[in-house]
Image (cartoon, rainbow, N blue to C red):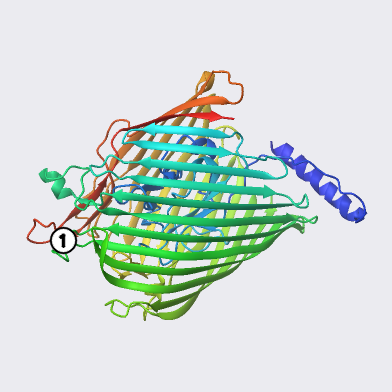
Amino acid sequence: MTRAILCVLALAMVLSSWGVARGHDPDEPELEVPEIAVVGEKPVAASSQQFIPDKEIILQPQGRPAQVLRLIPGMLAVEHSGGAGKADQYFLRGFDADHGTDVAFFSDGMPINLRTHAHGQGYSDLNFIIPETIEGVDVSKGAYLPEIGDFATAGAINFKTRQVAREGVVQATGGEFDTQRYLLMFSPTKDKVRTLVAVENYYTNGPFENDNRYLRTNVLGKLTTSFTGRDEFSIKGTFQKSKWNASGEIPFRTVDAGTLGRFGAIDPTEGGSTLRATGVMNYHYDTTTNGQFFADAYGQYYRLDLFTNFTFALNDPVNGDGIQQADRRVMYGGNVGYKQRWDLFGMPTVGTVGFQARVDDIHPRLGTQTKRVGIGTTTYSDVLSASYAPYIKGEIQPASWVRFVGGLRWETFTFDVRNLCATCTLRPEGHTSSGILLPKMSMILGPWSKTEFFVNYGEGFHSNDARSAVQIGSAPLARSRNYEVGLRSRPWGPEGLEFTVTAWRIDLQSELVFVGDEGTTEMKGPSRRQGFEVAARGQVWGPLYVNGSFTWTQAKFRNGDAIPLAPEFTAYGAAILQWPEGLTSQLQATYLGVRPLIEDQSIKSPSWIVFDWSQRYRIPIKLPYGRLEAFYFIQNLFNTDWEQAIFAFESRLQTEPAAVNGIHFVPGNPRTFMGGVAWHF
């Protein structure tokens, strides 16, 4: 494979040089050269950087796109509110990143994290993604890439959609709890103009005593083409609409006392609705001198109405503590730059310069509600948040056994907040701006004995909510310093197992966090997270493929207190077996260890491990056109009682005379079966 890639590159360079020397007659007809696909591994800058292919994604249980995140070593995503529909809660490298504060998510380069969100900073709802449209997932942990900025404290994840469907598919899935999913995906054209169309409809009541009635509709359309033979242009549009009921976070004390079942609800009127429409344009042009110009643009309209009740009757014994959060926004931005390859004194060198800009026009509102009827407003703002980021990146290989990658990124933010509620007790308002310079550097040594070694340093950040950023004495941008060393090895060649070992540390400065559920600003002190991760993935023997990881993390504030909800141990393991006659089986297990729920560690969450089983079978029935495939998933194979989101805080029921401090949780799903049939054409 390596020799083939080198031959293709050498041929391309010879033809390019010949064309430049010969010149080009504008009247001479251009030679149409057919596309040639060259498959090879993308160079990485850190041992923790990886690409997750679609063959692993397709075997994940259907319903929650965030399920694919557990394929990333050390990362977990759990449901947050007793019912799908809302963004998941994300864990990575000692961060309880809530809904995305310290993990940057992208879809074909378009940011998914939402700044100054009504519910939480960096809110990242992945439910607009149709998993079958994903070609793969690019993962980079830490903050070592100059082209990635806001929210990439613990890492960044980019979902890359495919250009065409290899086969069209009509799929129907059904399962327990009235779960249904329907999918249509096809490519009307596959040649010079490549198109992709996908439509998904999903419904479930979930295992809860009060039906979730979660209904989600997704539509995707994408077109890819080339204008000159040296460029590529793609445009993609998506639309998502969903609504749901939720059972919320219930007190453990009520389940212990037998007054409430694990899947019951204190306030069954929780839930919400959301809508998102996006457009993404990607373009690049390859010059005849080993350069590449690239330009991306994106825009989206988003809205959310969310109804929650965490403390029940603690603050308002008469009407209850129901919260209503609404978010309306338009977000747009882009990325433009140029990359050049050349030899610098005989050393292969790549230089990149780029500029990114993003604008969020936001209207977040927080109020109180009873049974989804608003009874008051806490904050209501008009927010304009903008960022501008030039960056440079350089890669040089002075010898066959060493490569350097580094760069600088400069971020400038402006925050404008205008109060729209004259009668609110909390009225954040003002204007401020802030900037931050972020150096990045990586050294890659090897390969020796099919093993590479990596040393990385990079500074990253996450922006804070604009409503806290405009307060006097605030810290609009929270800087992180990331350190990492690791190795990556394929001792049995490119088709065998790949091993990675990584040790890392993240120091995060003090920052202000806007608590969306309360409309207040909370001071957080400086923290340090450190740990290591080991992972193995690849073909073990013949039809057997494995993917597994284990991570250990220590997360503390610099005063010695534990960081609540930060996982200490996580693990994931999967075995995939390609049986004869078109049968594929997968057994996977996910583990989350004990976590402190408060700073002094006097209250901790229990650990859990959950197994899933899935199978896909190509039915050997001859059809006039296409083929049939049957599949099923069993989630929580051994019917384990486990907790997804879990917290410790004060609440009060209507029947209780005073507040009670204790554990509140969202139960994990019991054993659940889903199965279906797909026609591939």
Q: For this rendering, which residue is in front, 439 or 455? A: 439
Residue at left offset 41%, top offset 72%: 466
Vertical placement of residue 635 versus 308, above or below:
above
Total marks in image: 1
Q: Position of residue 385 (x, y in %)?
A: 48, 72
Q: Which amino acid does the dot numbered 1 rest on?
A: Ala
Q: Quadrant of the N terminus?
A: top right
Place of residue 358 in the rendered image (x, y in percent of width and height, measured from the top left): 54, 67
According to the image, label 1 marks what residue?
Answer: 313
Image point 76% across, 41% down: which residue?
8
* Residue 548 at x, y percent in the picture: 44, 37
Residue 8 in sight from this viewpoint: yes
**Which image quadrant is residue 316 in?**
bottom left
| Residue 131 location (% of width, % of height) | 49, 42
Q: In the displayed structure, would residue 192 be above or below residue 26?
A: above
Q: Badge 1: how crowded within 10 Å, few (<14), some, or many (20+)?
A: many
